[in-house]
Structure formats: C-alpha cells, structure tokens
Amino acid sequence: MEKVKVGIIGSGNIGCDLLVKVTQSPYLQCSLFMGRNLDSKGMQFAQKMGITVTDKSIQALDENPSLCDIVFDATTASAHAKHFEILKKHGIYSIDLTPSLIGKMCVPVINGKECLKEPDVNMITCGGQATLPIVNAVCNIEKEIDYIEIAASISSNSAGPGTRANIDEFTQTTKLALKNFSNVANTKAIIILNPAEPPIMMHNTIYFSIKNPDMTAIEQTVKETEEKMRHYIKGYRVIKGPVLQNNILIVMVQVKGAGDYLPQYSGNLDIITSSAVKLAEMYAMEKKYGK
C-alpha cells in the first residue's frame, strides 16, 4: 500500500514525537522534516532516522509543494497564521497543533470525519483533547448544565518553550472549545505546571455544575468514551468518577504517554500528537484509499 506523504514543521519535542508516530503508521510516511537549525537536537534526530530535513522551514515546501499531501504544524500560534496561507495556496491539508484557532476545532472521536473536508484543522490543546470527549459525551445526555470547568495539571518538565509561549492561548482556546463542544456558555480552563519530582503524569479534572443528573446514563457514556479514546491513546484512563457532590459532577482523567520520543509522563504532548496522527490516518484512508 502506497503511504501518504506528510511533512512536519517544527523540530521540537512535539515535532519529533510526531515523527516517531508517523514512522509507525501503516498509512503515513514523513517526506520532509522542516526547521531552521540543522544542528538542533530535533533535526539531528530526524537525520539519524534517515528523514529528509531542511533548515528553510516552510519555504522549502513552498518551493516544492508536491513533497507533501498533509502537513503537521508544531510551531507556534502566531507562526501558523503565516504557514497556513502557504499550505492553503498549494492545497495541502493542514493539521495545526498550535492553539491558533485558525482552522476548524477537532477532536477525532467527536468530529474527525467532519474535519476531513476542511483545508485547515486545529487540534485545540492537550487539555482539550483529554477532556472534551468526556465533556461532549456528558452534554449529549444532560442539557441542563450551568457551568463547566477543566483543570489540566502537567509536569513542568514536559512543558517546553512552545508550550510556555502559548499559555494564554491555551486557556482561551480550551475555553472556546469547551463552549463549542458542550453548548454551555459559562466555561473555564486552567493549566497547571507542576514542578514535582519525580514528574507527575498528566492529570485532568472536569467539573460540571448540574442538578439531578442521570448518573446511570452518565456512567455508561463516560465508560464508552474512555474505550473509544484508548483506541489511539492507550494511556488514557478515567481514574475517578463520575461522582456527584453537592450538584457538582466530577470526572478525573489521567493520560500516560506512549514513551515514543518523550517520557511517559509527557502525556500532555502524547495526546495531542496521537490525536493529530489519528486524524491524518483518517484523511489518508478517505482521500487516498476511499475508505
């Protein structure tokens, strides 16, 4: 089976983890790894894997767009605005791992198929990928929800320069995604960088302000959602809940990384790269193989 050609912009931790996952995919192959410094750790890692690299970043793809059918952008929210204009010009499917909110917001288990029709798709944030499936599932059952809050706690060690540069965008993008996938107007998103040693696993707590919920139906849908998520994120676990305390419904989710390029405690990065690769495989199956 001929694999679909993908490019990766960004040679940091997220870009390198994407690269490992792409090489493991039966449907994708990395044809170009794009950065700005051939001496960087990420670029050297890609070269050792035998991947074609360039220090011209997206300019290299602009000069030769036939190299890629799909591009992952693992840079920054501000950079993606410039990158997308070039990708759009050449008709290259763009999967954005920055919180830029330029493209359609996507969580593969919720609206992955819809997003295959879009030129640019935004993977929201790590906290969004971890919590929105549960939020959406509960909101499909319970319509009288007054408020939703998510708190994503990640190891400080797994927050690189890109993550730290986008903290404000993280909270705003996740909050907007909560509204979009829940139809609840009052939402809030919090991210916590925990400096504990040894490093903690990614931990997400979801709070719903709700009265008289159908707990049997909620328990069933949370269980089903966890199973769906584990199809492409094996370290996804509901570790507590759903439980109801004083009209507050609580669900806690832990994400353990696959340990491909990054440590297993970097579940926050693993969940967004895994989600992005899942979407790329869906695109490849439908657009390239008609499945």
Image (cartoon, helix red, strand yellow):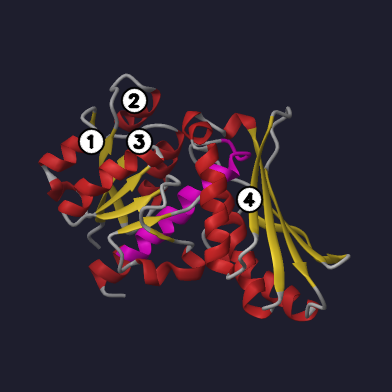
Does the magenta run of residues contain 23? Answer: no
Mark 1 or mark 2: which comes first in sequence? 2
Image quarter (top left, top right, bottom left or bottom right) of the N terminus = bottom left
Q: Residue at coordinates 11% horizontally, 40% vertically from top-left?
A: 63
Q: Nearer the viewer, residue 80 or 53?
A: 80
Q: Disc 4 vs disc 3: which is toward the camera?
A: 4
The residue indicated by pointer 2 is 44
Residue 232, visible in the rendered structure:
yes
Magenta region: 263-283
Image quarter (top left, top right, bottom left or bottom right) of the C terminus = bottom left
The residue indicated by pointer 1 is 52
Mark 4 or mark 1: which comes first in sequence? 1
* Element marked by disc 2: helix
Q: Quadrant of residue 103?
A: bottom left
Residue 233, visible in the rendered structure:
no
Mark 3 or mark 2: which comes first in sequence? 3
Identify the amino acid type marked 2: Gln
